[in-house]
Amino acid sequence: MKTALVTGGNRGVGKAIAMGLRDAGLKVVIGARDAKGGRQVADELGVDFKHLDLNDTASINAAKVWLPDVDVLVNNAGILEEVALLDEGTNFARSLQIMLNAPYELIRAAASGMRDRGYGRIVNLSSDWGSFKEGFGGGGGYAVAKAALNALTLRASQELPDTIKINAMCPGWVQTRMGGEGATRSPEEAAKTAIWLATLDADGPTGGFFRDKKPMEW
Ligand SMILES: NC(=O)c1ccc[n+]([C@@H]2O[C@H](COP(=O)([O-])OP(=O)(O)OC[C@H]3O[C@@H](n4cnc5c(N)ncnc54)[C@H](OP(=O)(O)O)[C@@H]3O)[C@@H](O)[C@H]2O)c1
């Protein structure tokens, strides 16, 4: 049975991805920064839980012990600041930490085990707001972090063996705390592309950027 880690799996799109992977027969672990709440959601879903705060180096270092056991890594956690990129109140470093540096560390640690076992699937939850083609969007460091996450996806795919598939995706505009109530799609709908990428066959794509299971431009 393959083991999947979904970061920020306690709510929103991450929770829907965790449910989908569980239903697809994977052993799912949700990572969450709030230990009590994360454990509660894991119990509710019938999956495992690991405390993982992506803004905390010690927490990431602790995870490096078990990350090599992960076959499927879904870098889902994200933050969207409500301030302008160049505003004094912007915590640019925090956006880059959670949506770029932490995914990089997790990918590196998980990839070592994936290489050994000759199997790995990595899914990076990005956004059209991180796309050069679509013109960027969002507050704070969001767009820059997602664009860099896209670059990380493509660059890592060039280094990883073809047995490890790494792809980025945009979930669309989703009804979550981040997306707000006016959003046009449900977390379950948004999770479909992530679940597809997390369970790709051996001849599936790598180094791509997808929305609704279709390639999109970086
Ligand atoms: N919603 C949209 O319309 C939309 C559109 C495009 C892309 N996306 C992307 O899709 C992904 C999921 O978004 P969502 O809409 O589900 O967002 P969300 O409802 O705001 O959920 C964000 C998740 O990230 C977690 N998180 C934040 N900071 C963290 C940290 N330091 N350590 C660990 N986990 C942390 C949150 O945990 P807490 O519960 O502890 O806060 C939560 O589980 C994100 O990468 C987002 O950028 C979303």
Image: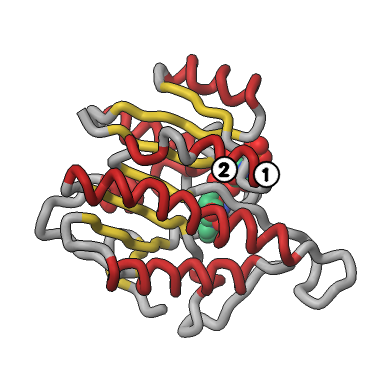
Tell me the distance, in whole angstroms, between the alpha carbons under discs 1 and 2. 6 Å
Along the line of sight, the residue nearer the viewer: 160 or 187:
160
Mark identifier at residue 60 = 2
Is residue 44 at all visible to an observer of this figure? yes
Q: Position of residue 116 (x, y in %)?
A: 21, 46
In the image: residue 165, left or right of residue 76: left
The residue type indicated by label 1 comes to: Asp
The residue type indicated by label 2 comes to: Ile
Q: Position of residue 133 (x, y in %)?
A: 46, 84
Label 1 crowding class (10 Å Cα cut-off): few <14, some 14-19, many 20+? few
Is the CB of mark 1 within 8 Å of ligand 1?
Answer: yes
In the image: residue 207, left or right of residue 175: left
Along the line of sight, the residue nearer the viewer: 64 or 46:
64
Mark identifier at residue 56 = 1
Q: Residue at x 25, y 58 (%)?
A: 165
Above-or-below relation of 59 to 196? above
Along the line of sight, the residue nearer the viewer: 168 or 53:
53
In the image: residue 3, left or right of residue 162: right
Q: Does dot 1 land on a helix, a strand or a loop?
A: loop
The answer to whether mark 1 and mark 2 are in CB contact below 8 A is yes
Quarter placement of the C terminus: bottom left
Q: Residue at x 67, y 60 (%)?
A: 95
Is residue 177 at all visible to an observer of this figure? no
Q: Position of residue 204 (x, y in %)?
A: 16, 59
Above-or-below relation of 144 to 15? below
Q: Residue at x 55, y 35 (%)?
A: 62
The number of numbered discs placed on residues in the rendered structure image is 2
Above-or-below relation of 95 to 39? below
Q: In the displayed image of the protein, which residue is found farthest to the right?
A: 88
Above-or-below relation of 57 to 184? above
Q: Position of residue 44 (x, y in %)?
A: 48, 16
